[in-house]
Amino acid sequence: MKPSPPQPPRPAKARRDGALTRVTRDARPFLRARTGVVLRLAGWSLLEFVQTFLGGFGVARALDHGFLAGRPLTGLLWLAVAAVAVLPAQLATRGVFGRLADLVEPLRDGLVRRAVSRALSGALAHPAGTTARSLSQVTHQSEIARDGWAGLVLTLRSFVFTVAGAVAGLLALEPRLLLIVLPPLILGAALFLATLLPMAARQRDYLTADEAYAAHAGRTAADLRDIAAAGAADRTVAESRDLADDQVRAARSLARWSGVRVVALAVCGRFPPLLLLLGAPWLLRNGLTPGALVGALTYLTQALAPAVQALMTMLSTVGGRLLVVLDRFTDAPPPPAEDKAEDKAEGRAQDKAEGRAEDKADDRGPLPEGPAPVAELRAVTFAYGPAAHPVLDRLSLSVAPGEHLAVVGPSGSGKSTLAAVLAGVEAPTGGAVLWHGRPVRGADATSVRVLLPQHAYVFTGSLRDNLRYLRPGASDRSIAAMIDALGLDPLLSRLGSLDADLEPDRLSQGERQLVALGRAYLAAPPLIVLDEATSRLDPAAETRAELAFAALPGALVVVAHRLSSARRADRILVMDGPRTRCGTSAELLRTSALYRDLAGLWEPDEEPRRKIGEPDEEPGRKNGEADSRLHGNGFISTPPPSPV
């Protein structure tokens, strides 16, 4: 994992401030510089005030002074006034959106400038610690802020002038109406405002938990081979379960606060009309006219309730997200709760990478010392399914400390399966696998063996971090000795230093294998299993790497793809499905027909000797084309692996 760039020290006050305080502090200068735009926006919005006022007032006058007084023409005229008031409000929409652009676009431009400035400053100050955060802020988060700010301004503007028009209309009809209408409005608004900060915090917690789980899932998917090779499946599952539980707890907390918000909406939008109807007899007995009562209901149902509903919906959905996004652009660091969550997630990832989890030891004590083989198979059988033919059939094998064992055989003969079973990645369907005389346990995996597959795992980060992946405390002297032993000098020279960033896509397959080999060399466990881990190296580089590993004190098991690799081993295991034979190269040449065929097949890869006058190419073969003759075992030769 690439380290995050160090943050500059922050004032203690900034660390204590909440997200709303930080955003408000940055918003004041922005709004103060655009006072004229705000006033012009308010000027256009006065037409909505007039529309709302005349809507309820016209209905009340149409009833009291028109239809109920026996003057229908007067009633129709008042209704016409209420209807005509809608036209100027619609015309004002164009002016409102024109002023809105003057208030919204500068916000987005300012956020983009701030993100770019920080990215450049951080890159200059800490070149090795740059991240993709600024890219997300420029392309995605700034657009979220822009759209959310535009929606909030429109909704808040409409709410303010609609409520003002309705309150003015209620005062004009009968001031005593406010005694019934205002208390539930104030109570619901207070309850809603009380949920803003907790909802924003719960939203942030949920987003943090969701991001942590997504990041863990991405790392796990990319590291499946290494997790299996390291025996870390149980630990990875436990980490996934913890992160999922964190996400569920955050979602439930967010849902509880959403329920409180629903209650606030009901109090604001549903209680005022209900209370007005319940208090109608008392109001009518004390001088309220029927027209005023109907006008008040018009204000509540056609103006106040929709405006309150729109505002609270906007604040509950866009408002919380807008606050969280804008807070990421402020100068203050993230809130402590989020820091702890991120530190927790990073700590888990670091524990996985370094192999420092507590499951390295248990109540069974340390591994016993003695002459027991490093790894041993006792009548091991393995099949890929209950009805499948066994790939390994009652195979017994032991690998002594310091021994070099090569495994050879045609494609599909079970070599990789043997490597996986020997390394504890696959459990046998029969028999037993022992490490140091004890049954294989996942808790011992990282301390006993390293399994390197053909496709090497290299992550984005520094060369040093990649090489120290299995041994975080490796010294520079150990790294230098490893580089000299394995021949990583050309790669190091090309990158410039151990702290240079590695981009896996820009490495050749051979360079990736060298990095993985260096990682295993530094770890130097008692058992190293190379499952065609040098297949992308040229013969000279492969020879150098295998001799370096053979010089280590631990046991070495190599799934070989060249005869020279097999000849360097102390013993060779020849596999042809469940049929196996083990011995030295000289013994197998006498006793194994398959090994003799493989030796003949591999001979062109070993600089074949030609008699004087023998042609360099066979008739009918193109220059450089691989020999495709079938041998008795049906194994077909292939071109040698590509050089690094």
Image (cartoon, helix red, strand yellow):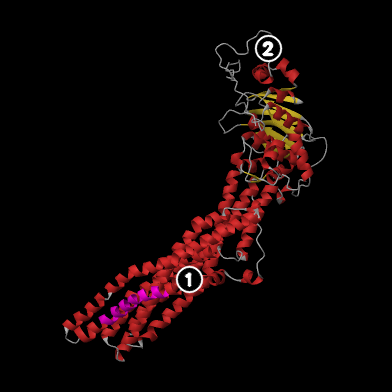
- Above or below residue 18? Residue 561 is above
Label 1: state its secondary structure: helix
Image height of 178 relative to 242, above or below: below
Read off the residue under disc 1. 260
Residue displayed at 70% across by 50% down: 357
Please state which of residues 110 and 199 is positioned toward the viewer in this rendering.
110
Q: Which of marks 1 and 2 is nearer the N terminus?
A: 1
Task: State the residue in front, 395 or 468.
Answer: 468
Left or right for 154, reference 339: left
**Which disc, if any, is residue 610?**
2
Left or right: 137 as drawn, with respect to 99: right
In x, y percent, where is residue 238?
63, 51
**Prevailing secondary structure of the magenta residues:** helix
* Residue 162, magenta (yes or no): no
Magenta highlight range: 38-59
- Residue 231, located in which quarter of the rendered image? top right
